[in-house]
Image (spheres, rainbow, N blue to C red):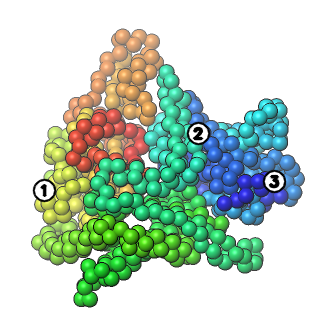
């Protein structure tokens, strides 16, 4: 950790280059221009506040969603320096907000550990915002500068003295630019749950820091959630396993690892911190989370590799020592030791190397050995001191090995018997295929034959295919591979896509550019949609990772007034009755408006279904993402588990959310 007494100054800021490229190619800096990237803007600003926390200068962060959907991120850290910069002769605040790769994280002075390796985050947010206000509380004053699309609108000014005893800190308020995020005003908005889940993660990983989220869009009172967890990763693992039966206490530990690294052309001694926690449950599913300098790296990296390697090696060593594995037995592999495991690893590295600015994967080679060393020491001691729990863990791995061996044999048999299914030599008879091929084509999965008939009439036969599914498909969260492949609806779906499933999945063999789930807006439709999402999540996860899975948004209402027809669609954080009331308020004679509420796809004729839901020029599609792995796994565990009431409550409340984290 950085010495909290070490005050950041203008000398700590290194200027490298300007901002122009961000607006030109936002995908390189914030990962795109969709709803995922919209939320990434908030994460970038909050990451800066977390860096202050890791430097020991901040213990409170607040994020406010204002009624106009602008965002304010505040912290009680030291505040961005405002004095003139020693290289550039302008305010350091302006340099930090407008010069790409300028920041206090390059020289190694004010920050020993930081998530902002690239020095891009907050200025990328500035570049893609319609407007941004940076306010700094430090040096006895409140300083402020306003920007429009990244351009400063005047110099940094002291607007008033800082009240005596008031905390220092940085306050960033921004509004995303609709020229960059084309759907920001109509199709998507900041999602409270998505942000809350992310900040919950951050609070677990950054022990001792309070993060508060406030949504002022909620009426009559703002919605608030506050996150503070003294237990760190141990508490996080318990939270993730709250719907599962654990077979032992959480194994956790932390340690430091010294290594040499190059910095500014010379070799220096450095230290990285490693923290981990894991626990086995009676589930067959694996939940892994990996963080680098508090940043969630969804694609893992060397820290995750080190954790997996250590767990597998320690279990093998113990199992052979205690006679669970005989001389003729093969070692456990990750396939066996990962089953039922909930594991989190977090490293703090002075120079993290990420795969990209969006920081999805950690690349530092030295991290793997460091993590493996720390985990091995703690886990070996745990097994030696807790023989009863050790036996349970090894027996679970033995069970997983036996099941995997049996499944491998069964799979070979099933693949042989169903070769035509998985190789896609025979398409299902109910499939209404399209004539074109390639990424521009679409497969609509439609609920029921009735709606399927309307969709078949409505579609553009050149690039849109229709696959109707009857009734409730199999609950794939709890079903075996054999039962899944015996389901007629699942067979039809696998055959239509042509990709195969699980280890045999090949995105290159996919027969369509995208898959679109189209169901009714009622509870049954939500249930079918959830079951489909479960199938894709468990058996075709690359479909989600490659951004090839979408959910269609049929309209909720059809309003007709004086022969003029308008359709109204679901909006995030807006209830149906509020949406209707707002729509009717736009008419001079609301009582003369004919309102039709669509409860099912079958209530629309083919022309209406095309114009409102299937026509690329008019429709709204929701991209299915896996951004929040922890919340995703918990949602599926709860939805597909044996307890019915929480599942029904969730389906009713969330069936039409604008962003589905799965």
Secondary structure under tag 2 reads: strand
For residue 557, above or below residue 469: above
For residue 257, above or below residue 65: below
The mark closer to the camera, 1 or 3, is 3
Asked if disc 1 and disc 3 are in contact, CB closer than 8 Å, the reply is: no
Say left or right for 243 vs 356: left
- Residue 170: horizontal and vertical position, in percent? 71, 43
Mark drawn on residue 63? 2
Asked if disc 3 and disc 2 are in contact, CB closer than 8 Å, the reply is: no
Q: At 68% from the left edge and 42% from the top edge, which residue is drawn? A: 76
- Residue 344: horizontal and vertical position, in percent? 45, 61
Secondary structure under tag 1 reads: helix
Q: What is the CA distance from the residue labelled 2 to the residue labelled 1?
A: 48 Å
- Residue 622: horizontal and vertical position, in percent? 39, 45
Q: At 48% from the left edge and 56% from the top edge, which residue is drawn? A: 233
Comes first in the chain, label 3 or label 2: 3
Mark drawn on residue 9? 3
Q: At 76% from the left edge and 62% from the top edge, which residue is drawn? A: 109
Q: Which residue is disc 1 drawn over?
A: 488
Comes first in the chain, label 1 or label 3: 3
């Amino acid at each position: 950790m950085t010495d909290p007494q070490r005050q950041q100054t203008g000398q700590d800021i290194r200027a490298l280059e300007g901002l122009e490229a961000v607006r030109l190619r936002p995908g390189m800096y914030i990962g795109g221009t969709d709803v995922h990237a919209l939320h990434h803007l908030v994460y970038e600003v909050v990451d800066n506040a977390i860096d202050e926390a890791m430097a020991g200068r901040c213990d409170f962060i607040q994020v406010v969603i204002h009624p106009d959907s602008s965002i304010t991120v505040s912290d009680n850290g030291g505040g961005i320096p405002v004095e003139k910069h020693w290289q550039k002769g302008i305010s350091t605040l302006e340099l930090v907000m407008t010069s790409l790769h300028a920041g206090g994280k390059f020289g190694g002075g004010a920050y020993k550990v930081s998530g902002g390796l690239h020095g891009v985050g907050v200025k990328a947010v500035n570049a893609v915002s319609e407007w941004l206000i940076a306010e700094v509380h430090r040096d006895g004053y409140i300083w402020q500068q306003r920007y429009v699309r990244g351009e400063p609108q005047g110099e940094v000014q002291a607007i008033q003295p800082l009240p005596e005893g008031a905390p220092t800190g940085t306050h960033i308020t921004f509004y995303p630019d609709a020229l960059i995020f084309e759907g920001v005003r109509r199709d998507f908005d900041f999602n409270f749950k998505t942000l809350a889940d992310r900040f919950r993660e951050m609070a677990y990983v950054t022990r001792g820091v309070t993060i508060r989220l406030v949504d002022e869009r909620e009426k009559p009172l703002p919605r608030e959630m506050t996150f503070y967890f003294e237990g760190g990763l141990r508490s996080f693992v318990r939270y993730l396993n709250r719907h599962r039966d654990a077979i032992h206490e959480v194994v956790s530990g932390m340690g430091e690892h010294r290594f040499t690294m190059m910095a500014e052309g010379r070799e220096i001694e450095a230290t990285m911190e490693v923290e981990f926690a894991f626990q086995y449950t009676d589930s067959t599913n694996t939940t892994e989370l990996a963080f680098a300098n508090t940043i969630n790296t969804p694609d893992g990296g060397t820290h995750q590799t080190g954790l997996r390697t250590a767990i597998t090696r320690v279990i093998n060593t113990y199992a052979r020592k205690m006679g669970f594995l005989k001389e003729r037995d093969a070692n456990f592999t990750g396939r066996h030791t990962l089953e039922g495991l909930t594991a989190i690893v977090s490293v703090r590295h002075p120079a993290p190397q990420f795969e990209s600015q969006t920081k999805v994967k950690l690349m530092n080679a030295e991290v793997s050995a460091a993590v493996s060393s720390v985990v091995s020491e703690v886990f070996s001691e745990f097994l030696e001191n807790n023989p009863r729990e050790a036996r349970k863990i090894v027996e679970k791995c033995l069970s997983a090995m036996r099941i995997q061996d049996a499944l491998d044999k069964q799979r070979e048999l099933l693949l042989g018997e169903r070769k035509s299914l998985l190789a896609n030599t025979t398409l299902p008879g109910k499939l209404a295929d399209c004539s074109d091929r390639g990424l521009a084509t679409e497969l609509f999965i439609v609920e029921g034959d009735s709606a399927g008939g309307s969709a078949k009439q409505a579609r553009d036969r050149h690039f849109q295919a229709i696959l109707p599914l009857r009734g409730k498909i199999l609950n794939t969260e709890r079903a075996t591979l054999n039962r899944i492949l015996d389901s007629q609806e699942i067979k039809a779906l696998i055959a239509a896509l042509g990709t195969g499933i699980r280890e045999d999945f090949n995105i290159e063999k996919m027969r369509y550019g995208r898959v679109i789930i189209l169901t009714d807006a009622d509870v049954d439709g939500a249930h079918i949609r959830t079951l489909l999402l479960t199938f894709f999540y468990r058996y075709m996860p690359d479909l989600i990772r490659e951004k090839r899975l979408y959910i269609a948004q049929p309209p909720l209402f059809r309003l007709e007034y004086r022969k003029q027809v308008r359709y109204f669609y679901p909006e995030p954080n807006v209830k149906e009755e509020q949406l209707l009331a707002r729509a009717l308020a736009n008419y001079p004679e609301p009582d003369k408006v004919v309102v039709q509420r669509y409860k099912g796809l079958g209530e629309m004729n083919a022309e209406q279904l095309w114009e409102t839901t299937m026509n690329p020029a008019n429709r709204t599609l929701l991209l299915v993402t896996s951004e929040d792995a922890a919340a995703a796994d918990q949602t599926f565990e709860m939805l597909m588990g044996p307890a019915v009431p929480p599942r029904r409550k969730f389906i009713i409340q969330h069936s039409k959310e604008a962003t589905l984290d799965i």
